[in-house]
Amino acid sequence: MIAYLKGAVAAVSESILVLDVNQVGYQVFISARDAANMPAAGNEVKVFTWMSVSQDAIRLYGFLREDDLEVFRLLINVSGVGPKAALGILSVFTADELKFAVLADDAKMIAKAPGIGSKSARKVILELKDRFSLEEAFESRLAAADGEAAPAAGHSAAGDEAVQALVALGYSGSDALRAVKSCEITEDMDTETILKLALKHL
């Protein structure tokens, strides 16, 4: 198994990267989002990879971010979602955005990805919801936004539920997390109480 490749960009299209690694050109299937963020030809890049071996072909799928690769691996294990559909999802959503959509039961949003209908979107939610942590998703989002990880929100199930409720109301994940963290939460507080306090900080 090839964990990653590091080399010079030889060519890139909307779905394929040709990477020159020590004068060997590797064809790597990529998402449209990664294609748009790929450096210009001749520049060095590192892609995290997953290898698919079938009777008629060996294919490499690559990602600029390791968390996208991890989500890709989860997606291809969902019944009815293959590598092409998984790349389609990750062409539309970052790993964090998909996690929030799954945790919020937002099948309508997931179905916006090419090749994913409402039925497949429901399967993604059903099979992946228990694999994602709301706290980890928010910490990852804040780490990307602020350059450093933040402590978990509320340190309680009620605090997590309040954050999820704020996201469902339309607030961004980062704003929701910061609002809940700004509250002085005690162990006897329920979700509704925390939500009311958090709304005052928004």
Image (cartoon, grey):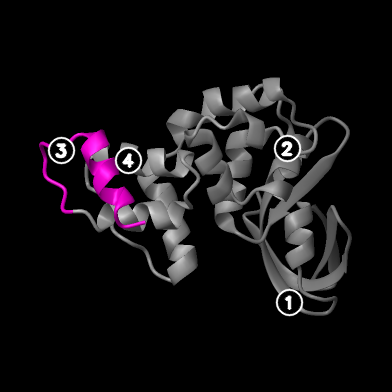
Distance between the alpha carbons at the discs numbered 1 and 2? 32 Å
User: Are the residues flagged by discs 2 and 3 in contact, CB closer than 8 Å?
Assistant: no
User: Residue sitting at 70 percent across and 24 percent down?
Assistant: 118
The three-letter amino acid code for the residue at tag 3 is Met
Residue 165 vertical placement versus 9 (above, below): above
User: Are the residues flagged by discs 1 and 4 in contact, CB closer than 8 Å?
Assistant: no
Instruction: From the image, tell me which residue sits under label 4.
Output: 162
Instruction: From the image, tell me which residue sits under label 2.
Output: 112
Find residue 76 and report its image quarter: top right
Distance between the alpha carbons at the discs numbered 1 and 3? 52 Å
Q: Nearer the viewer, residue 176 or 23?
A: 176
Give the SS element for disc 3. Answer: loop
User: Residue sitting at 43 percent across and 57 percent down?
Assistant: 174
Task: Where is residue 38? Give x, y as percent.
Answer: 76, 68
Task: Where is residue 147? Give x, y as percent.
Answer: 44, 71
Q: Report the magenta residues as a range.
A: 184-202
Q: Please tell me whether residue 153 belongs to the stretch shown in magenta.
A: no
Give the SS element for disc 4. Answer: helix
Instruction: From the image, tell me which residue sits under label 3.
Output: 189
Looking at the image, the residue that sits furthest to the bottom is: 42
Give the SS element for disc 1. Answer: strand
